[in-house]
Image (tube, rainbow, N blue to C red):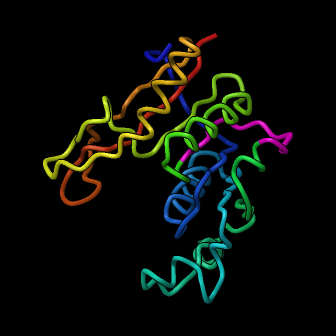
Amino acid sequence: MLSSLSLRPRKVLEIGTHIGTSTVYIAAALQRLHGDGLVTTVDIFDVDDPKQGAWKEVGLRKSPADCLKALGLSKHVPFQVGSSQDYMRATPERYDLIFLDGDHDAWAVYEELSLALPLLQENGAILLHDFYPGGNPIRSNGHAIGRPFRAIARAQKEDPAIQVLPLGELPWQIQRGSNTTTLALVLKRG
């Protein structure tokens, strides 16, 4: 039940590392919560590549792995290069939290969600990025990515036990002076 949800994950799977911002925050949060923890992060590209890593393209001075090393968190974050679907099909691991922030096409989100659900520990949750309820904008700029919403709607139609809790308003500002987030928790009852 969503009203009694309490998350204190120790093992996290992140799909879509990109420049590693979420990776660093998740690893730091696990360290603060438990003094340890593990964040396995998967990206189709080698995010630490010194010539082609996205961190270079956006003007950062350090790769995701270098940022984690500087914070003393590198032993808590194994990087996986390859398809998220291939990783999720092959891994024997189970996770307390899975953060889906990779490919945002409807088919990819649907497939990743379908593969992620069986990888959850009991009482685990999926955190989905770019979930716009109803596929509608949530900020004044009118921008919305409807594909993750369509993927979730399809999954819920096929399995009514799947619940979605859009996080909506956060008690802190996130970007462009807004505190509205496109993050949503996805859970499966029973």
Q: Residue at x 45, y 39 (%)?
A: 148
Q: Is residue 99 above or below residue 119?
A: below
Q: Residue at x 41, y 26 (%)?
A: 165
Q: Is residue 187 magenta?
A: no
Say which of 124 and 182 sits in front.
Answer: 182
Which residue is situated farthest in the front direction here? 107
- Point out residue 98 in the picture as x, y percentages from the top left corner: 61, 41
Q: Give the magenta part as a residue range.
A: 89-100
Say which of 186 and 173 sits in front.
Answer: 186
Q: Is residue 121 above or below residue 82?
A: above
- Point out residue 189 in the picture as x, y percentages from the top left corner: 59, 13
Q: Residue at x 26, y 37 (%)?
A: 169
- Point out residue 164 in the picture as x, y percentages from the top left corner: 45, 24
Say which of 107 and 67 sits in front.
Answer: 107
Please give left or right for residue 90 compared with residue 132 in the image: right
Q: Residue at x 70, y 35 (%)?
A: 115
Please give left or right for residue 142 compared with residue 19 in the image: left
Q: How many marks?
A: 0
- Point out residue 47 in the picture as x, y percentages from the top left corner: 63, 73
Please give left or right for residue 139 compared with residue 67 in the image: left
